[in-house]
Image (tube, helix red, strand yellow):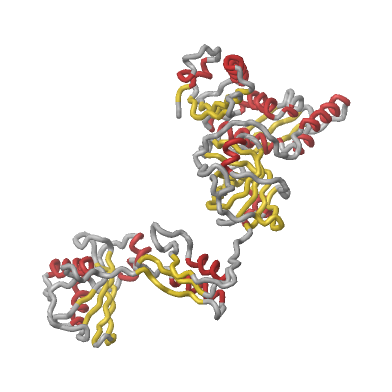
Amino acid sequence: MEIILGDFLKEFSIDSDERIKRGLLYKITHSTSFSKILFYVKYDSIVPFSSVTEFEKNMREKFGMEEFYLKCSYPPELFTIDYYGELIQNLKRNISFVNGFFDNSEAVISDNTLRIKLKNGGYDILQKANFTTETSKFIYSEFGREINVELCGELEQSDDDYNNMIKTALDEIPKHYEPQEKEEPVHEAPHSVVSDAENLDINEVDSDNRDVIKGRRIRDSYISISEAFASHMNENVVICADVFDMDRRELRNNKTVLTFTVTDYTGSLIVKVFEKNEDIEHIGYDRIKKGSTIMVRGKLGYDTFSNDYSIMPDSIVLTKRIQKKDTAEKKRVELHMHTSMSAMDAVTPASVIVKRAYEWGHPAVAITDHGIVQAFPEAMNTVESIDDENFKVIYGCEAYVVNDTDPVFIISEPDERSYNDEIIIFDVETTGLSPQKHRLTEIGAVKIRNMQIIDSFDTFVNPEMDIPAEITELTGIDSQKVADAPKEAEALGMFMDFCGKNPVLVAHNASFDTSFINEVKKRHNIEFD
């Protein structure tokens, strides 16, 4: 849903600044009783803080709501030093204890850093409250721009008024997160797939196996992502989820942004972390891999920069799920396992299947993919790494056979020769798929008699044209390898000499291979039966 805010409210008489009405309303969240509502609106110019608060007040009075907030989003280029006064007004509302510390303060923006020059001290208390990080997050949520925040100037004072202000600020700093029963906005979360995790067959987390990556050890109980979407938007939550995607990007302000996309199978979201470049290697994020299970505590909200739901964590803990066990006294053998090589059917790699069967005490496991054997090497390498003679991999396949009762001709120009006569099995590599536009790059063949290999042939072919990069990646043949090779007419002549007169030719994709051979014959007037 995207609609001009003024059009959305045109049926109601709401007094507001015209600049408020020109915004683009793209999302609404609300509590189940509609007593608390949040509008998310995009603007192409800054709306004064006073206009925002006046509009919020009018909306609360008009509709009798306990709480109403307007969440403004702006293009990144609108964050300039002219916005500093508006920024402080917003921070005073969102972080109450900043009152007084920023009176008469000044600021400059350089090298993508906002430097705030204090005039009334308060540096220590602001650092204790993680003010610079919270301010960076606020700027990011409003403008989608990563800005480093630094405090300088008069960092502390020593008079009674200052000491009283410090005491008041200490009392107002939020305490450590404690779960509370609150009615908060209900979100229609696009990533949510089930209402709760209770009915899912997901392994529990090992409470004794927790490795702190960032912040502190998390002792709070975690909730499902779907529950967080439903009842805990814009507040601190603790979730436990598996990492299925990761990204790392260096910013221009000497910081790095790390994003971990996670799921607990009730929903998915992004965990986003900003760290200074010099700190990133010491924190231990490299221990988080795809497939890792992490517990995260932080504020859940909508990230206007990535247009997705995200958590800005204050703590990340690496943990492990308690693996299920096969407690059967007599272990079974699974004789029908599909791996990720079975397209559109299975997603589990062969190595994971083999390891799990071994961990459960099974004596063997059978790999039986659909019409392919590509999983065999991975399965073989895995069972060799296990190195237990009492455990086996059974190599199988769901094979597909030709229905030879139907009149389907798979032989061209059949004659009376048998399988024990001389047969040439050949294959070609090319620069592309069209025999008219593309050329041969290699011809390979083996000669069989009495079902035994008696000779072989192989030659590169100079195609006299560039070999595309994707073909090189597929075949391993590049222009350098074929530079001194015979051209197509000579190469075909060599192949004909190898085959002899009236050969029986066999190919896996015969129509493709012979189409290129026939085009070479046609271009050079070569006879080859």
Spot occupied by residue 367 in the image (x, y as percentages of width and height): 44, 70
Whether 174 is drawn above or below 264: the answer is above
Q: Is residue 171 left or right of residue 48?
A: right
The quarter of the picture where residue 144 lies is: top right
Residue 225 point in image, percent of width and height? 58, 43
Quarter of image, res 389:
bottom right
The residue nearer to you, when weighing 435 against 26, is: 26
| Residue at the (63%, 44%) spot, across then down | 223
**Horizontal relation, residue 528 to residue 116: left or right:** left
Q: Position of residue 507 (x, y in %)?
A: 24, 73
- Name the foreground residue: 70 vs 362: 362
Quadrant of the rendering where the C terminus is positioned: bottom left
**Residue drawn at 17 percent across, 73 percent down:** 411
Nearer to us in this view, 159 or 187: 187
Q: Is residue 105 left or right of residue 253?
A: right
Asked if residue 56 shows in the view, the reply is yes
* Residue 150 appears in the rendering: no
Q: Is residue 457 left or right of residue 332?
A: left
* Residue depicted at x 71% and y 45%: 220
Q: How many marks?
A: 0
**Quarter containing the N terminus:** top left
At 57% from the left and 78% from the top, the residue drawn is 388
Where's residue 366, x and y in %? 45, 71
